[in-house]
Image: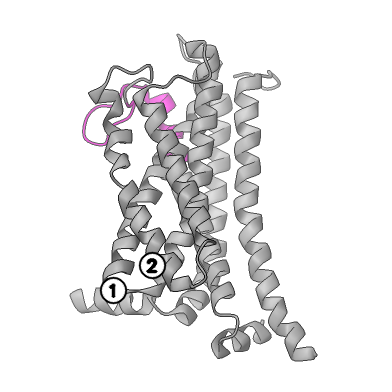
Amino acid sequence: MFQALKNFYHKLGSFPWFYKISGKVIPIVGFFSILLIVISSIWGLFFSPTDAVQGDVYRIIYFHVPAVSVSQVIYYSMSVAAAVFLIWRMKMAGVYIKSLAPIGAAFTFIGLLSGAIWGQPTWGTWWVWDARLTSTLVLFLFYLAIIGMQSTFASRKSADTAVSIITLVGVVNLPIVKKSVDWWNTLHQPASISISGESSISSEMLIPLLLSILGVYLFVFFTGLLFMRAEISSREQNKEWFKKLSSNN
Amino acid sequence: MDFGEFNIHIWSVVSITGFIFLLLIYLPLVKIKKNESKIKINETT
């Protein structure tokens, strides 16, 4: 088992292997992620019950919660990749961070924007500087810094090293985002769904929400592979394996 | 929500999210096609 994992880890570091395998996996993951997102969106928008307090506007939850959840998980995964890059200098880890940063930024943006649009009719304001919103904005700024830093270095290795360090620094913010609603008195409500405890929303609303979360996670896997493939095609375009593979397609 | 009922808050979130999703698919695909076609152009010239 350990040997199989070790072999997989070594294979994962190979650009030609990854490029070939991802080409086969992408259409399947893409199809199922989009299917799940469409089903959960239609279910959530039209077939789940109306909220007694908020009315229909609560349906933004089917876009807001998956987006903010995945934006934090992406950052955690990037920090693992950053550690791998700094310890073992695995090039694929650098590709991973560069590829996932724009996806993480996009989902944090969706989370912030949908939260503001939801906040306007329910709280009476688009934005407040409370702990949850501010720490999520800081997360978004970290994503932007990571994206921006990629182009400020002449050498790819220096850029990957600097970006890995910044990614690890930003990890401090993640527990603050998660625990902000418990540690401080915030306008933002505490989590409605819990893995360990009981969720505070009805199952009729919860099932499409869980489906949309699953769909978005699959979508991130799908677009993550796409972005990594694109990054590899940029870095390796002068390599013999890439020329051979491209001319065969 | 009834079919046909328009809620500006919900539909603005849906349309912005949909647009960003499309971008996240379109941008890497264009980059891959561009890099792969560079090889083909170099081969023919």
Q: Residues within 10 Å of mark 2 (few under 14, many from 20)?
A: many
Residue A193 % position (x, y): 32, 29
Q: Which mark is residue A88?
A: 1
- What span is in magenta? A191-213
The answer to which image quadrant residue A136 occupies is top left
Judge by depth and name the residue closer to the eye, A231 or B17.
Answer: A231
Q: Which mark is residue A245?
A: none
Position of A106 relative to A176 (above/below) = below
Q: Output the chain of dot 1.
A: A
Label 1 and label 2: CA atoms lie apart by 9 Å
Q: Secondary structure at mark 1?
A: helix
Position of A245 relative to A40 (above/below) = below
> Residue A197 magenta-drawn?
yes
Residue A230 % position (x, y): 58, 67
The residue labelled by disc 2 is A93
Judge by depth and name the residue closer to the eye, A172 or A241.
Answer: A172
The amino acid marked with disc number 1 is: Trp
Is mark 1 in CB contact (under 8 Å) with mark 2? yes
Position of A38 relative to A218 (above/below) = above
The reply, left or right, for residue A238 in relation to residue A146 is right
Judge by depth and name the residue closer to the eye, A130 or A76.
Answer: A130
The reply, left or right, for residue A182 in relation to residue B32 is left
Residue A128 % position (x, y): 45, 19
Q: Is residue A1 something that shows in the picture?
A: no
